Image (tube, helix red, strand yellow):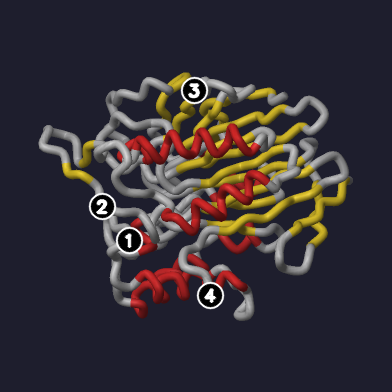
Amino acid sequence: MASIVLVSCATPKNIDESNSNDFTIAFGSCNKQNVKNILWKEIKKNQPNLWVWGGDNIYSDTHDMNKLRNDYKTLKNQKGYSDLINNIPVLATWDDHDYGKNDSGVESPKKVEAQKEFLDFFNVDKNSPRRKQEGVYHSEIFTTQKGSVKVIVLDTRYFRTALTKSTKNKRRFTPNTYGKGTVLGETQWKWLTNELNSSKADFNIIVSSIQVLSAEHGFETWGNFPHEVDKLKNTIIKSNAKGVLLLSGDRHISEFSKTQVPNLSYPLIDFTSSGLTHSYNGFTSEKNKHRVQNVVSKISFGILKFNFDTHKIKMEMRGKNNILLQELQQTYP
């Protein structure tokens, strides 16, 4: 049994690794707190070393902090959730439905108060620097006897500027003029750049609540800020960070997006996993030039299995009864 140490500004913890992989992350998004989540027990079967929330962890859609607080309490009591997280760490970002109102960004009037409720729910220490920081972005390093994984959690809500509404049918938004607006904001961009530049980890996992690579569907995506997508790619290239993988949620579908980035020695993959309690059952088709394999429109969660000897990540979409719905493997230099 390998020993895993969690490295952060908090006191390091020893985490048991009891499965056959060197390290396992489970993640998911889009969880209605008032709906039975039948996947918690299935996620636990995979013996993850870490659970990552990808946003829309609850559906509150409110500026009323009492309602938000009560909705978090409902999640806390959702059958199976505490059984999963009792003995493993949890990292999280938020998306619009647990941040404020649908599709909201920098303009949300109660974002400071909502951040406090978020940090309270995830038991962030009252003296943590995160309590004074604007936005819920955060990173932690998980170190095993064989190697390490850095998880970088972004906040794509707090600083995200205005979107451009589309005039075309079935499209909510159209990309902004190149160079106009931001997803992360100046402070978070500086932080992310430093997190990647300073990383010595064998793998670097970037969590974004909204999709990064899929950009043609007309809903929320980094693709509505095409210059920000380019900036992210260039930041990754210049950092020389090893094994960067993107995780996303939001869409009520799950899919793998993959692209070759010039001057990056491995393909950039965006693994979208959504949702945990509900999904786009009526899905028929949607353009995504970066998609590999198929869209999964059933409730599902994501699993990442790391092998430090082979520098490989096995990515799995799993659903009811822990059935494997789709998988993708990537070996990194």
Image coords of residue 174 (percent x, y)? 22, 37
| Relative to 19, residue 67 above or below | below
Q: At 59% across and 25% down in the image, what residue appears?
A: 264
Label 4 to label 2: alpha-carbon separation: 25 Å
The residue type indicated by label 1 comes to Val
- Would you name the residue on which mark 2 appears? 162
Mark earlier in primary sequence (3, 2): 2
> Which dot marks residue 259?
3
Which numbered circle lies on residue 106?
1
Which amino acid type corresponds to the residue marked 4 in the rendered image?
A: Lys
Q: Secondary structure at mark 3?
A: strand
Q: Earlier in the sequence, mark 4 or mark 3?
A: 4
Residue linked to disc 4: 132
- Which tag is nearer the camera, tag 4 or tag 3? 4
Could you tell me how far apart the alpha carbons at marks 1 and 3 are, in whole angstroms? 29 Å
Name the kind of residue labelled 3 in the image: Thr
**Which x, y percent locates residue 16?**
81, 53
